[in-house]
Image (tube, rainbow, N blue to C red):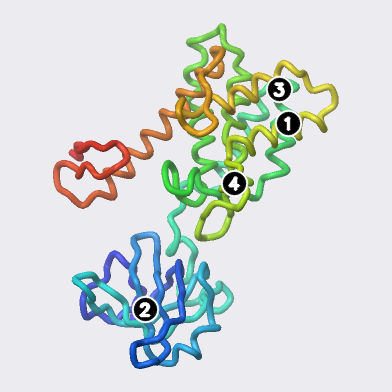
Amino acid sequence: MKLVQISDFKLGRSIQGFYLCKEKHLRYTRSGDLFLDMVFSDSTGTISGKLWEMADQFQDRFASGDPVAVKGKVTEFNDHLQLTVTQVNQATHRQYGKYGFSLDLIINSVEEPLDKLWNRVLKVILSLREPYKKFTQNIFMEHEQKIRVIPGSVQHHNPIRGGFLKHLVTTTEISMDILPYYPALNKDLVLCGILLHDIGKVESTNDNLQADYTDAGRVIGDVTLSVNIVQNAASSFKNFPEEILLKLEHIILSHRTVGDVGAIGSGFAEALFVHYINILDDQLNLMLNTIVKDSNQGWTNNHNQFCSELYKK
């Protein structure tokens, strides 16, 4: 039997495949029997699942947040497809690699290999003059592991594995094309500001398969965390210029739309440039994702971030 993705589930079909267990709860039926109540997802969709038999035996074989190997049958409940599970186990490359298991099956990731995106960001960093180059390089080397994999955001723009890195590549490379038209701007400050404007997300977002906010992300927020990281890096950098630090702090605080928590208006040209480049990539990605995910023909519905019907043709 071939592997079946959630988007291909049809009522009555027996399936087997690899999915991410987003939720798992051990519950009781009205008659007092144990069952597992679960939510599965892959790169194509999400579905609820129930395991009615031997729930106590399968309970300890996997946890919420694990990749899992599942067998079952597609059923229906309240006019929605549901998966009646007969077997479920934690999926690892060692045990299931020979059966086709891959993380790409269960999570949405950027299309370009992460190594290539990372190298494109490093190319931008190495193009900077000092002290911008060494300063930015130090921060990126310290946080490389998370920079490579975290999403651009948990719910909004680039909400996929590697989305943060993709956002940096897009905004820096667009900027390098535009900056020659504005020779009065400090190119190094702009690019450094773009590279660091969201750096707090390495502390506000976890790098689990099921991305979510950390406690620090919920309590403090990524903007403040970004400022903290830049300040700490400057304190350990010998004679880092105070004026550059001040401008980087302002770029971080002003890159969001005024009205967002912690956001302030842009106070100089380089900050304004970073602000609009960031909004351009954020909003375009959000609109494109909204259009792709909407199931209507011709126009989307208006239940979206833009509160408007969007043209799909």
Amino acid residing under circle 4: Val
The answer, for residue 241, to whether it is visible in the render is yes
Task: Estimate how packed mark 2 is, as few (under 14), some (14 to 19) or many (20 or more) residues with alpha carbons within 10 Å.
Answer: many
Tag 3: Cα neighbours inside 10 Å, few (<14), some, or many (≥20)? some
Q: Please state if 166 lies on the left or on the right of 13 as rendered.
A: right
Q: Residue 311, position in %: x, y?
A: 19, 36
Mark sitting earlier along the chain (1/4): 4
Q: Is residue 147 visible?
A: no
82 left or right, relative to 125: left
Q: Is residue 274 left or right of residue 36?
A: right
Of discs 4 and 3, which sits in the foreground?
4
Earlier along the polypeptide chain: callout 4 or callout 2? Answer: 2
**Separation of residues labelled 1 and 2 (CA atoms):** 50 Å
Counting from the top left corner in percent of width and height, residue 187 is at 60, 17
| Sequence-first tag of 1 and 3 | 1
For the residues bearing labels 1 and 3, Cβ distance under 8 angstroms: yes
Task: Give the residue at x 53% y 42%.
Answer: 164
Give the quarter of the figure containing the C terminus.
Answer: top left
From the viewer's side, name the closer residue of 52 and 282. Answer: 52
Examine the rendered structure and indicate whether residue 199 appears above or below residue 92: above
Q: Which residue is mark 2?
A: 16
Looking at the rendered structure, the kind of residue marked 3 is: Leu
Say which residue label 4 marks. 219
Q: Residue at x 44, y 44 (%)?
A: 158
Q: In the rendered structure, which disc, 1 or 2, sits on the residue that comes first in sequence?
A: 2
Cα–Cα span, label 1 and label 3: 7 Å
Residue under pointer 3: 245
Q: In front of the other: label 3 or label 2?
A: 3
The one nearer the camera, 26 or 238, is: 26
Name which of mark 4 and mark 3 comes first in the sequence: 4
